[in-house]
Image: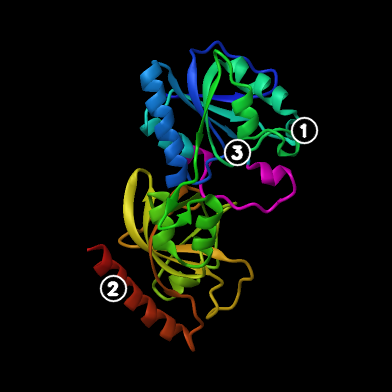
Amino acid sequence: MVMKVFYLKPDSSYSLEPSVCAIGYFDGVHLGHQQLLKRVEKIAHAKNMKKALMTFSCHPKEILGKKDFKYLMSLQSKIAILEKRGFDYFFIIEFNQDISQYSPTSFLECYLYKNNIEHLVCGFDFHFGKNGQGDTRFLKNIQKENFSVDIIEEYDVDGVKVSSSFIRNKLEEGQLEQANQLLSRPYRISGKVIYGLQNGRKIGFPTANVDAGHYVILKKGVYGVYFYHDGKCYLGMANVGLNPTVGEITKISLEVNVFDFDEDIYGKEVDVDFMFRVRDERKFASLDDLKQQLKRDERFIRHYFD
């Protein structure tokens, strides 16, 4: 059965079967978020109800002032994860400034009660409604016969609270292995291949320049990656940075040298899974020195994947 996706406006109303629904932004769907999904699955099975998740079209922080908010995953990646887990409904609130001013009661009436959500699962720090007035205590106090709530407590790994912000920090610090562990999958950036300066081609290492959009950018350096295009997977090495040896760009770029690959993919959508970090980006004395280092990087990456 294909999961049904609903984009919710305040006046949206669907005739749906009763569901158990997790609510939150779920950026990264990391190990902490997965505790909520497991609880939904357990309760839905016990009560013979549909499994659902409710999120927002963008992170509320982006509407409430943090304009340059960086994301760990795309909406399509969330959909793919939920479909794989067999969820029935995916609700996406089309969030804006007006909705941020709703009272907690109005929020529940517009988005939960109207869509036949009878059991809500949320994290211990979940807030909603104007100025975050709605919280877990509020939800516990308004439970009734056809609306109950489960609160999932903080989830720790080795004494550290698992959170999206913590994972963002790990990626920016170059701690890719720890970030991937907490995500329970490789960190992925999806985007279109765009035109670059084509300097890599001049030294025998042509690259696909991937538009990283609003994704969290990893610490500058070289990474071993899986590169996905047109349903096929390739090995590759990615450089995140400013290409200091060439010295011609001012904005951090993501460039991937895809091994054993020779296709024109400008304008195509690709996925890059970051598997391990190889080294920091650095400036070389000459293009030939850079070329020799890239050869060593490629040998290392191929050996690592083997």
Q: Tell me the mark number nearer the camera, choosing from 1 and 3.
A: 3
Q: Which residue is mark 1?
A: 101
Q: In screen coordinates, is 9 left or right of 45?
A: right
Element at label 2? helix
Amino acid at the residue labelled 3: Phe
Magenta segment: does it hold 282?
A: no
| Res 299 label | 2
Task: Identify which residue is drawn at 67% across, 34% down.
Answer: 128
Real-space CA distance between mark 2 and mark 1, rounded to the nearest whole angstrom: 55 Å
Amino acid at the residue labelled 2: Arg
The 10 Å Cα crowd at callout 2, few under 14, some 14 to 19, many 20 or more, is: few
Element at label 1? loop
Point out the tag, 2 or 3, that comes first from the N-terminus: 3
Real-space CA distance between mark 1 and mark 3, rounded to the nearest whole angstrom: 16 Å
Q: Tell me the mark number nearer the camera, choosing from 2 and 3.
A: 3
Depth check: give the residue in front, 25 or 289.
Answer: 25
| Res 32 label | none
Q: In screen coordinates, is 144 left or right of 76?
A: right
| Res 126 label | 3
| Residue range corresponding to the magenta coloring | 59-77
Depth check: give the residue in front, 209 or 12.
Answer: 12
Residue 178 location (% of width, % of height): 41, 60
Quadrant in which the C terminus appears: bottom left
Answer yes or no: is residue 306 visible: yes
Amino acid at the residue labelled 1: Gln
Q: Residue furthest top?
A: 15
Element at label 3? loop
Task: Identify which residue is drawn at 49% across, 89% down.
Answer: 285
Residue 65 location (% of width, % of height): 75, 48
Q: Main secondary structure of the magenta part?
A: loop
Quadrant in which the N terminus appears: top left
Real-space CA distance between mark 2 and mark 3, rounded to the nearest whole angstrom: 47 Å
